[in-house]
Image (tube, rainbow, N blue to C red):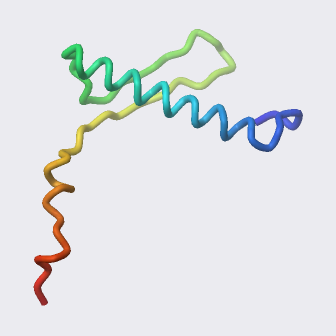
Amino acid sequence: MDSQDGPDEGTDVTTEFQHELKSLILDAFTNGAELEGTWEVTVPVEAAPDWTIEISKTSAAETASYDPDYITD
């Protein structure tokens, strides 16, 4: 974040990035794209870093199986 940025500007940009990423993943998934894997993103700007992105799915069934009423000692 640049020193001239406001205190919330970085947070707003991060929130927007997360929203756009979530939308991109949902759209790609619903259109049948293969999402899981490691993606190498090389940017054409010399001063900017390249990125490695890993995508793996989690199952909603795994989190849905948690039922605190059935915990035994």
Q: Which residue is depicted at the point 26% across and 37% down?
A: 56
Residue 69 at x, y = what percent? 15, 76
Q: Which residue is depicted at the point 11% across and 85% down?
A: 72
Residue 41 at x, y = what percent? 45, 20
Residue 21 at x, y = what percent? 45, 27
Above or below residue 3? Residue 71 is below
Q: Quadrant of residue 16?
A: top right
Q: Which residue is depicted at the point 64% across and 12% down?
A: 45
Image quarter in which the C terminus is found:
bottom left
Q: Nearer the viewer, residue 39 or 71?
A: 71
Q: Nearer the viewer, residue 72 or 3?
A: 72
Above or below residue 31? Residue 63 is below
Q: Relative to 58, is 5 on the left or the right?
A: right
Q: Residue furthest front?
A: 69
Q: Quadrant of residue 36?
A: top left
Q: Relative to 22, is 50 on the left or the right?
A: right
Q: Nearer the viewer, residue 43 or 10?
A: 10
Q: Which residue is depicted at the point 19% across and 16% down?
A: 32
